[in-house]
Structure formats: C-alpha cells, structure tokens
Image: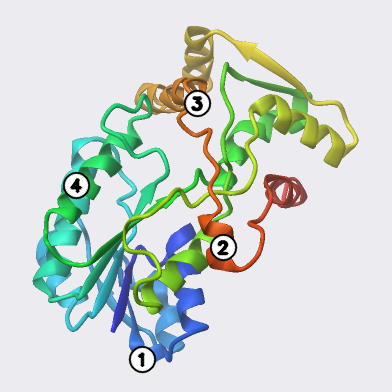
Amino acid sequence: MFVVTGATGHLGSQIVDRLLDRLPPDAVGVSVRDTAKAASLAERGVRVRAGDFTNPATLAHAFEGADKVLVVSAAIRGDAAVAANRAAIDAAHAAGAKRILYTSHQAASRDSLFAAQPTHAATEEHLAGLGVPFTALRNGFYASTLSLSIGAALETGQLVAPADGPVSWTAHADLAEAAAIAMVEEGVLDGVTAPLTGSEMLDLEAVAAILSDITGRAVERVVVDDDEWRASAIARGMPAAAADFTLGLYRAAREKEFAVTDPTLGTLLGHRPTSARSVLETIVAQR
C-alpha cells in the first residue's frame, strides 16, 4: 500500500494521479482531513481515510498497512508546522512503513531568510534520525506561486514588488511525476535529494518581460522598498503575518537562496522540465 497525505491539494492530487498511472487503485491510499473532498478518488478504487497531522491519533488508521508513505508538508507555518510534519512522519514509522518520503524544498536550511525553509530543514533532520529508508524531495520553488505576483501586473502593467533575485521556478506537474517515480521505483531517489528544479532561473524583471511578450502589452518591473511594500500589502487586506512571511521570500531571493538549477529532475523525468514561460502562459490564459 502506497499512502499519500494531502491528496486533495494542488501537489498531492497530482501525485496520486501519477501513482494511478503506475499502480492499481487498490494499491493506493490517501490520508485527507476531509474525506468528502476525496470522493472521486474513492470512486476510482483508492482507499480514502481521514487523517490530520494536528490530531496524530487519526493517523494510525490512515496509515495502516502502508509500505510507503509520502508526507506532503503541512500547509501551516512556524513551530506548529514542524510539529505537524513530525507527527505525520512518526505515525508513518509506527505504521511500519518501509520508506517515508517528504516534500521538502530546494532551499531547506536552518539559516534561510524565508521562514518555510527552517521548517523543512528541521523536518528533514527528524526524518533522517529515524533510521529508516527515507526520501526528502527537495522540490524547486513552485512556479504556480507566480500568480500571486503577477495578478495586479496584468491589470496595471506594473509588476510591483520588493527587490528580488533569480529563482528556478518549477512546475507542480513535474514534481508530482518525480514523487510518483520515487515512491514506485526503489532506490531512484534516496535520502536528501539534489534540488529538483526547472532548468532556468528568472527574476521578476525577466518574468515581466515574458508577460509583455505573452500578452502583447508592456509590463514594467517596479521595485519598491520592503517597508513600503509591506505597508501597501497590509492596506490591501493581507494579514501582517502573511506579509512578513512573503517579505522573507523576497529577502531570501535577494541572497540567491533559490538561484540553483540541477539536472536531476530532468534526468528523472526523461525530458526537459516545464518552462516558467509555459506556466505563465497557463496563468494568463486562466485569467
């Protein structure tokens, strides 16, 4: 039994789809907080069970009989995220999983300026300390998050944000395929992986140029002071904690924390990873 958590989320749902390309449905299980949202998976023959990282008692049933468990990192922040991830990993270990996989990040580090990365680093350390085979998938920065930066730019013609740096934007679909391969094919990815990234790096100035080309309308990159951006974001309704979290992303990018490309993902997929331009084209088409 191959069990995936967060199977109704953006990444988890695609991982399950890729697993079902390779395995019969009765070999796949999912752990989700709301089983009603996974009704379509149950209809396909997937084992659907309720599991919540913040309620570890639910995970024993969700992971029962699992040979491999893929823990999609908790969609929460701070110390609570580390505790949630650890709870899921410990439950997978207790269930007797022969390999535990975790969706980490290319820039996982205790010293990162982006708050998500110390969480990933702490989770990796815990996972490695269990003494069981594991895979920490160091996923590239999700290209779909560009939609958060460019939404207003498509309306105003200005991509306004703090100073940034190059990022190896990576498509969810490619990372989902890699995760499914890692689950099914033993020994392909073991331990902490190399960065699983796209093959190019773009800063927001380059993103603005691509948007100009895609839309046929000039999009200007406008750099604003950190404090000015934070105040503006909060004035528009963003919670202060979320603004500070996002500002950490820009500060980390300026320090080139995400300025890494690696051939591992393309080699694993057998083709060049999806380009950031292709993701941007999809974002623009959906607006």
Above or below 46: residue 277 = above
Look at the image and tell me whether residue 173 can be seen: no
Name the kind of residue labelled 4 in the image. Glu
Q: Measuring from the top left, give residue 235's x and y in whole percent.
A: 50, 16
Q: Measuring from the top left, give residue 219's x and y in whole percent.
A: 80, 26
- At label 1, counting other C-alpha atoms closer than 10 Å, the crowd grade (few under 14, some 14-19, many 20 or more) is some
Residue under label 3, please give it.
Answer: 256
154, 102: nearer the viewer: 102
Q: Which mark is residue 26?
A: 1
Residue under label 2, please give it.
Answer: 267
Look at the image and tell me whether residue 241 can be seen: yes
What is the distance, in whole Å, between disc 2 and disc 1 at their CAs? Answer: 29 Å
Question: Which is closer to the viewer, label 1 or label 3?
Answer: 3
What is the distance, in whole Å, between disc 1 and disc 4 at their CAs? Answer: 32 Å
Residue under label 4, please give it.
Answer: 125
Name the kind of residue labelled 3 in the image. Lys
Above or below 140: residue 130 = below
Label 2: element kind: helix
Label 3: element kind: loop
Location of the N terminus (image quadrant): bottom left
